[in-house]
Image: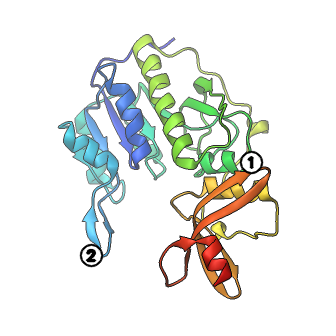
Amino acid sequence: MNAPLPKGSFVYFGTPEFSTFVLDGLATVGLVPTLVVTTPDKPAGRGLAPTASPVKRWAVAHGIPLLQPEIFDEATIVALREINCDTAIVAAYGKILPASVLTLFPHCAYNVHPSLLPRYRGTSPVESQILADEPHVGVSVILMDEQMDHGPIVAQEEMPQPDWPVARSVLNGRLWSAGGRLLARVLVDGAPEPRVQDHTQATFTKKIHKEDGELDLASSDRKNYLKYLAYEGWPSTYFFKDGTRYKITKASFQNGRFVVERVIPEGKREVGWSSAESA
């Protein structure tokens, strides 16, 4: 078993909102990073103004120093080395850490992943578990190596979902928050002996594209509803009828049927689907 981690002795790599759930879980037991590494500000909104990532906003609010490298060049490696932390924590950073970065953390580099590894490795584990109607969801903490979601498992927790299926935002909140609590226990109490993943059981997820949100309303009602939940927010779900594209903004599953309730016809304002269908 590894020794417990001293408070404030790690570098945190993360970017989106659900990565802040892990930070919150650590902060509740007094564990805050010495440095936060996140992606550079990106243009967003109509004015394309540079916009900070949620993790950057969290770091600024908590007074934590920041690093936002475009690439891990020599200057970035030097900056990380000068921080003199021997542990890294990675939670949805958005980039693969090269060996030149991993070797800077001789104690260990932990990764929080929202699935029961080795299943659902890759970039879209939450969406993929919803699409697969997965009965066993959960979260894993692993030791990182140079392959994606491949390293030894330190801790795992299955999380039954009595209200399944749930939307992506709901499942993200539950799994990443659980990941923060699970990692906090590992860091406070000391990590148990890691176990190698059974790589023969590995499954892989894919990057989501905008066109993945297209539905065929004549296909399986259950699958359409799962896709609507999985692609909530972005890329969202849509369908074509009589040459018009309709973005679904509200739908439900009633008596085994996928029921479209509200839509945005292409180039128009949101309306009830019954009104759009009869227009």
* Amino acid at pointer 2: Gly
Can the viewer see residue 206 in this picture? no
Residue 103: mark: none
Please tell me whether mark 1 sits on a helix, a strand or a loop. loop
Q: Position of residue 174 (x, y in %)?
A: 52, 35
Scheme of colours in the image: rainbow
Which residue: 67% across, 78% down?
A: 277
Residue 47: mark: 2
Residue 132: mark: 1
Against 39, residue 248 (above or below) is below
The C terminus lies in which quarter of the figure?
A: bottom right
- Give 263 or 81, whichever is nearer the viewer: 263
- Give 43 or 278, whichever is nearer the viewer: 278
**Structural distance between the alpha carbons of marks 1 and 2:** 38 Å
Q: Position of residue 170 (x, y in %)?
A: 53, 42
Which residue: 41% across, 36% down?
A: 21
Residue 106, picture quadrant = top left
Q: In the visual, does 138 lie left or right of 133?
A: left
Residue 89, picture quadrant = top left
Q: Position of residue 117 (x, y in %)?
A: 66, 35
Against 154, residue 113 (above or below) is below
- Mark 2 nearby-residue class (10 Å; few <14, some 14–19, many ≥20): few
Which residue: 59% across, 58% down?
A: 231
Q: In the visual, does 230 lie left or right of 84?
A: right
Q: In the visual, does 259 lie left or right of 5?
A: right
* Amino acid at pointer 1: Ala
Please tell me whether mark 2 sits on a helix, a strand or a loop. loop
Q: Position of residue 77 (x, y in %)?
A: 31, 47
- Give 124 or 90, whichever is nearer the viewer: 124
Can the viewer see residue 241 in this picture? yes
- Give 214 or 279, whichever is nearer the viewer: 279
Q: Which circle's residue, 1 or 2, is located before the other in the chain?
A: 2
